[in-house]
Image (tube, helix red, strand yellow):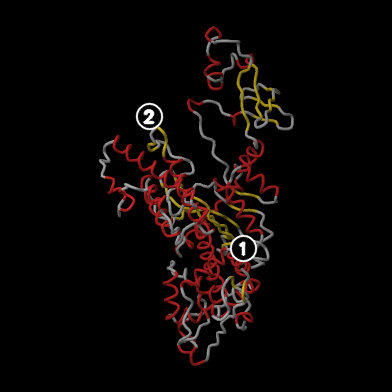
Amino acid sequence: MTGIPMPLRTLETPPERDPVLLDPKCIEPGSLSWLLAKARHVLFPANLNPEWRGSRVVGRAAGRCAWPADVLFALVVLRWSEGGMSRLGSCRRARTDLAWRAAMGLPIGSEGAPDEKTVREFEAWLRSRSESCDVPRYLLVHEHIARLALKESHEPTFAMDSTPMWCFGALRGTLRLLTDGTRSLVRWMRRYIIDSSRLDEAIRDVAWMESKSAKGALHVDWHDKEARNRVVENVARRVLRVVSVTLSLLSSLRPTQQRKVNERCQSLLRVIECDLEEDDDGRLVVSRGVARDRIVSITDPEARSGRKTRSQPYKGFKIHVLGDVDSLVLLAVDVTPANAPEAPAGHALIRQARRIRGDLSAVLADTAYGATATRTALASEGIDLVAPPHAIQPAKSGKLQKHHFKIDFKARTATCPVGQQTSDRRRTSTTVSYAWPIAKCEGCPLAKRCLPKELLKPPSASKGRPRTTGRRIILHPEEQRLRNARDKWDTSERRNRYRRRSECELFVARLVRHGARQARAFGLDSARLQVSVIAIRCNLTLIAKAGNLDPAILGSKP
């Protein structure tokens, strides 16, 4: 369906209805509301204005005037000005709060304010990609404001860190994931299709399907292992049957309904795959282990389990932030599932930051971001990753490890701790190793600490052909770069430079203070938008306090 032009609202504020003239103290100079009131049109990128519904909107007839994008942008930012609030709460406050109305450029009176639906549609528009550069629009807004906040003459010190973010979806155990997810799936299908006889047949005589509490309707002694196993088996088989019937009915649904229903079916199947296993009798029972990519919420299937520390697990997402520790400007933020590794996310964050500051040449980060492959990739791009290399775990019983052996990568030789050199270099498709002949290892004073147990046995106790190879070490694919990083890290200059990384905890504190710890909507895309808007709000506060914008621009009209 083609778009139909939609006129924009013309917001004129007569002097007698101007919030600032009626109450000069409603906005304080240097505050976020003051900055938005003065330079709202400058802060929102002008190239995005034509893409908002003021130029066209899909499937909507012309007539009702649309709110300008900069007005909605101001409202979305103000929503996170005090720790975050709901869309409905922000819309209600925008109707009565003089500071908010001044920031949005709204007069006092019957002009009203954008409703919750308009704000929701505007946030969805920000999550979508720009027509000009195929980048999410909220990312373009964030980069635009970060450029304004970071002075060109300033010599920044960049650092990055991560922090947990709790998901918005309800966290459930295996049984609740299956029962609650299936009940909501059945409700959707009854609402979407006319003839639900096949679906009703699949859920016939299932007491927990219509009850308020699924676990309460099962009437089982949860202390009885056999009873628990029978319940899990019955629930899992019923869920598989419902999913099978639902997938056969997908063709009768509209495309948007198909996507929604199919995602729920795949989530239920994923729960069964990760959380259940077959026992010796062929019954489905709860697995003893934990799957690597286990779903923790059926309503928020992108959330995962993660750990802040070894003793602090959490469920949800992981926030990554990169900024300047001197000015506290947040250059780049991102959100990943909680179990995602930091190194790839950090690499993407640095690339995002380089679009703002092309001279970015060094970043401070912790060990989690310092994977050898990431260091190599960043070094090829001219970026020095100042991060501690992964620590070498001490071996049991004082055994000699790989780092005790010297490697000459140019001559392709290896030397053991007692000075025995070997050129027996063996290479496969994935590994490189060095081996010493058993003759050189026999009688060595460090043999007990160096050789494996089977080589320490007397020749008469060995079975099969006698061994000709003694100690063997297998190198990391990036062994040379890994050793160089460890040697470089041992210098005092490197360690002194790294001490400033702890200051990036201020980035995390600012994001969390304004509501980034808890996601306020379902899904990874919504979490990314939320964190990006909070980062925009933090950067705008720095601009307002420092006065980085040209006074002529602040006083100009759009």
Identify the residue shown where x is 70% and y is 47%: 380
Q: Which mark is residue 129?
A: 1
- The residue at which mark 2 appears reads as 281
* Marks 1 and 2, how far apart at CA: 51 Å
351 w.r.t. 45: above or below:
above
* Quadrant of the snapshot with the N terminus: bottom right
Q: Secondary structure at mark 1?
A: loop
Q: Nearer the viewer, residue 74 or 233?
A: 233
Amino acid carrying label 2: it is: Asp
Q: Quadrant of residue 286?
A: top left
Depth-wise, is mark 1 or mark 2 nearer the camera?
Answer: 2
In primary-sequence order, the first of circles 1 and 2 is 1
Count of marks placed on residues: 2
* Residue 396, position as x, y percentages in the image: 48, 27
Q: Nearer the viewer, residue 529 or 64?
A: 64
Q: Which mark is residue 252?
A: none
8 w.r.t. 160: above or below:
below
Identify the residue shown where x is 39% and y is 41%: 237
Q: Work out whether residue 343 can be spotted.
A: yes
Q: Nearer the viewer, residue 462 or 25?
A: 462
90 w.r.t. 439: above or below:
below
Crowding at dot 1, Cα within 10 Å, few <14 / some 14-19 / many 20+, comes out as: some
* Residue 355, position as x, y percentages in the image: 66, 60
Crowding at dot 2, Cα within 10 Å, few <14 / some 14-19 / many 20+, comes out as: few
Q: Nearer the viewer, residue 315 or 64?
A: 64
* Residue 439, position as x, y percentages in the image: 64, 13
Q: Work out whether residue 307 can be spotted.
A: no
* Residue 457, position as x, y percentages in the image: 52, 13
Q: Secondary structure at mark 2?
A: loop
Amino acid carrying label 1: it is: Arg
